[in-house]
Amino acid sequence: MSKKVILITGTNSGFGWLTVQSVAALGHKVYATMRDTKGRNAEKANALSALENVTVLDVNLTDDDSVKQAVDSVIAKEGTVDVLVNNAGFSLNGVAESFTTADVQSIFDINVFAPWRFIKQVLPAMRKQSEGLIINITSGFGRVSFPFATVYSGSKFGLEGISEGLHYELKRLGIDVAILEPGAFPTEMNQKTNYASDQSVFEGYDAIADLPNKMINALGALIQAHNPNPQDVADAIVRLIEAENGTRPLRTVVDPITGEFIEAANKAVAEHFGKGLTTFGMGELLN
């Protein structure tokens, strides 16, 4: 397997942290992005920088110029970016009405616009070499919208939509776009409970006030019972990277808890989506 230049976002914890180490151990050149590498993430940045084949980049995902400078620096040094892994993510919880416009914008800026910023910057180099791979980490909640995760699901639906369209637009150009849908894992993001800003609406939801805690408790019990290993997600990313170009599936589910029904949804949609492409004269993109 040829060694690749791989850019991974959200590497200070969770799936990103594990993926950097897994990919670098195979000899690939890894560029790992995170914020505040001289401050709160200094220890994490130093630990990854100490690994062979890893360079840490301080990037503000919500800033166009910061993303462009990071990608430009990689291309200036390496000549290209072979693989982009959009892993960084952000979540808020609560009844949908409690989300302010600023709350919604903050989630979409990280979960939708940030991946798009990177995609826009790496595509010219990928098109030039007629080869590349973009892996977008979404969620099982990007296929179904669960109550009290409504806005988070909306953002992951958005990334799924961008990824699915790009998958077909770019495959003839030698560029694969793959979606990875993790379920619930004991990562730092899933262990934090961040609530939306407008708590004044809560008194109007007395009839279902106990349900958010029931969901959190049930999820905690499922995680404890199944003990899902976040390394499984990193391993799935490695398998996608190692797969032959043009053979990678559009969607990969890594979810020992609810993966069965997400897989079923994916299968049903794929069948009818193919019929839709054919109906609209684009059936050749399925091959």
Image (spheres, helix red, strand yellow):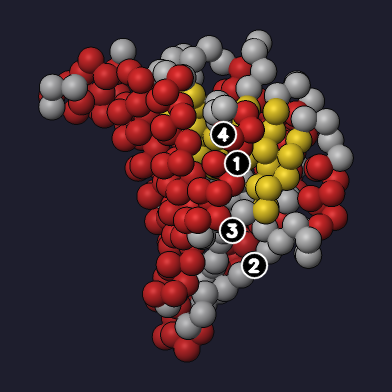
Of mark 2 and mark 3, the one earlier in the sequence is 3
Camera-nearest label, 2 or 3: 3
User: Residue 281 or 29: which is nearer the viewer?
Assistant: 29
Camera-nearest label, 4 or 3: 4
Q: Amino acid at mark 2?
A: Thr
Residue 214 rendering spot, x and y as whole percentages: 60, 65
What's the residue at 56%, 61% (across, down)? 91
Return the residue at label 2: 193
Return the residue at label 4: 75
Q: What's the distance in space between the residues labelled 4 and 3, CA to CA?
A: 18 Å
Return the residue at label 1: 73
What's the residue at 63%, 22% (across, down)? 4
Camera-nearest label, 1 or 2: 1
Q: Are marks 4 and 3 in contact (CB under 8 Å)?
A: no
Of mark 1 and mark 3, the one earlier in the sequence is 3
Q: Are marks 1 and 2 in contact (CB under 8 Å)?
A: no
Q: Are marks 4 and 1 in contact (CB under 8 Å)?
A: yes
User: Residue 276 or 121: which is nearer the viewer?
Assistant: 121
Q: What's the distance in space between the residues labelled 4 and 1, CA to CA?
A: 6 Å
* Mark 1, secondary structure of its residue: helix
- Quadrant of the image for the C terminus? top left
Q: Amino acid at mark 3?
A: Asn
| Observer able to see residue 69 | yes
Horizontal side of 246 relative to 275 (left or right) equals right
Camera-nearest label, 2 or 4: 4
